[in-house]
Image (cartoon, rainbow, N blue to C red):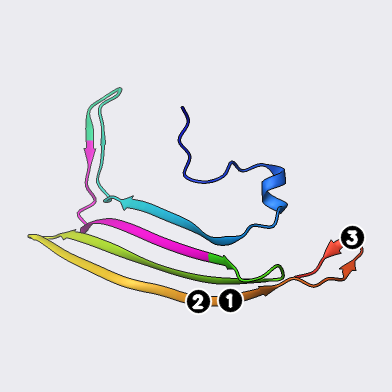
């Protein structure tokens, strides 16, 4: 038994005309560490340049909706945002967190009937 979240992606599915509402979801997790480094091979060593340590964790989310309004018109909308937590260590740990809606956009794609050198314009 196979479970799928969407149609299989093949060459034919990329170019076929789709109907109805479709969506694309992207989720990313990014982690960046500090300037401290540790090594245990071949010799145990530790390095700290004395600067402020900053660790950042960021979760980004992007959602895109595509709706086939007619054979020639597609309506597209997209939005993205993130949640970010930043820990700064100096004398004590200071935590700062941000939430932000980065962008929202709407668009319309229109497909022309006439071809130009075997390419269908849109």
Helix, strand or loop under label 1: strand
Question: How would you rate the neighbour count of disc 2 (Cα within 10 Å): few for under 14, some for 14-19, many for 20 or more?
Answer: few
Q: Secondary structure at mark 2?
A: strand
Q: Is residue 14 left or right of residue 45?
A: right
The answer to whether 6 is drawn above or below residue 54 in the figure is above
Task: Point out the image quarter for the C terminus.
Answer: bottom right
Q: Is residue 69 above or below residue 48?
A: below
Q: Does the CB distance between marks 3 and 2 fall below 8 Å? A: no
Residue 71: x, y in percent?
70, 67
Where does label 2 land, which residue? 105
Task: For marks 3 and 2, give the CA distance.
Answer: 31 Å
- Which residue is label 1 attached to? 107
Number of other residues with Cα within 10 Å of mark 1, as a class: few under 14, some 14 to 19, many 20 or more: few
Closer to the chain start, of discs 1 and 3, is 1
Residue 9's label in the rendered image is: none
Quarter occupied by residue 90: bottom left
x and y percent of residue 17 in the render?
69, 57
Label drawn at residue 118: 3
Q: How many marks?
A: 3
- Left or right side of 43 for 3: right
Q: Secondary structure beneath disc 3?
A: loop
Between 43 and 71, the one lying in front of the other is 71
Residue at the image position 27 percent from the left and 62 percent from the top: 84
For the stretch drawn in magenta, what is the main secondary structure? strand
Residue at image coords 67%, 47%: 13
* Position above or below: 58 against 97: above
Asked whether disc 2 touches disc 1, contact meaning CB atoms under 8 Å apart, the reply is yes
**x and y percentages locating residue 50 in the rendered image:** 19, 54
53 magenta-colored: yes
């Amino acid at each position: 038994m196979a479970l799928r979240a969407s149609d299989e992606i093949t060459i034919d599915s990329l170019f076929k005309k789709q109907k109805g509402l479709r969506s694309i979801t992207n989720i990313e997790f990014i982690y960046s560490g500090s300037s401290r480094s540790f090594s245990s091979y071949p010799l145990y060593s530790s390095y700290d340049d004395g600067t402020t340590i900053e660790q950042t964790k960021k979760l980004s989310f992007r959602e895109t909706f595509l709706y086939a309004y007619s054979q020639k018109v597609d309506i597209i909308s997209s939005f993205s945002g993130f949640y970010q937590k930043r820990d700064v260590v100096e004398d004590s740990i200071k935590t700062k967190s941000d939430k932000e809606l980065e962008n929202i956009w709407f668009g319309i794609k229109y497909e022309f009937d006439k071809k130009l050198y075997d390419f269908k314009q849109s």
